[in-house]
Every structure is written in structure tokens, then in C-alpha cells.
Image: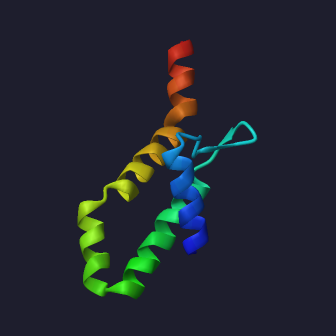
Amino acid sequence: MLEEVRLFRNRVAHNEPLCFKSGAFSLDRVEKVYNYIGILFQLLNRDLHDLSKIVFAIHRNLLEVSDFLSDLPEIISQEKN
């Protein structure tokens, strides 16, 4: 888990794409790393994990992007009409 978080952090630091793999959009890796960080926080300290839920809006943002993507076909069809 730590290695995956480290590699992801390096991608962020070097402004590399986080949600694209072979030209396809996917939030899978972002969600996986987010979950790994949550597990690591729990292992370090339960209070830290609870605090991280309040401080970090990542999960909320992931849900918003997922909702937008699920609505995208409908949005596109409405724009064509």
C-alpha cells in the first residue's frame, strides 16, 4: 500500500495524468489510493483517520466526478437536441 501511495504521489508531483490509462478515463487508481491512505491512517491512529474524513474532500470530489460521468450521456443527448 505504501508503495502505491508513493508512486501516486510522484505522479501528482510531476503533474502526470491521474485518471487516464491508455487513453481511457478511470477513477479506479485514485479511489484505490484514497482507500489505501484511509487504511494507513487507521493503522496509525483511529483519531487521525476520523480527522482525515473531515479535512479531505477527496471522496466527495470523486463522487461528484462519478455522478457527472454517469449523467454525461444524457447531457450530450440533450445538447444534440
Taking the spot 49% from the left edge, 47% from the top edge, the residue there is 13
Q: Position of residue 60 (x, y in %)?
A: 35, 54
For residue 61, side relative to residue 14 (left or right): left
Of all residues shown, which one is farthest toward the right? Answer: 22
Q: Position of residue 52 (x, y in %)?
A: 29, 69
Q: Is the residue 43 above or below the residue 7 in the image? A: below
Which one is nearer the viewer's eye here, 10 or 72?
10
Q: Position of residue 61 (x, y in %)?
A: 38, 49
Q: Position of residue 29 (x, y in %)?
A: 60, 57
* Residue 25 seen by the camera: yes
Q: Is the residue 79 above or below the residue 5 in the image? A: above
Q: Is the residue 53 above or below the residue 49 in the image? A: above
Taking the spot 50% from the left edge, 37% from the top edge, the residue there is 71
Which one is nearer the viewer's eye here, 22 or 77?
22
Taking the spot 29% from the left edge, 68% from the top edge, the residue there is 53
Taking the spot 25% from the left edge, 83% from the top edge, the residue there is 47
For residue 4, side relative to residue 36 (left or right): right
Q: Quadrant of the N terminus?
A: bottom right
For residue 21, side relative to residue 1 (left or right): right
Of all residues shown, which one is farthest toward the top? Answer: 81
Which one is nearer the viewer's eye here, 29 or 4?
4
Q: How many marks?
A: 0
Which one is nearer the viewer's eye here, 26 or 48?
48
For residue 56, side relative to residue 7 (left or right): left
Q: Quadrant of the C terminus?
A: top right
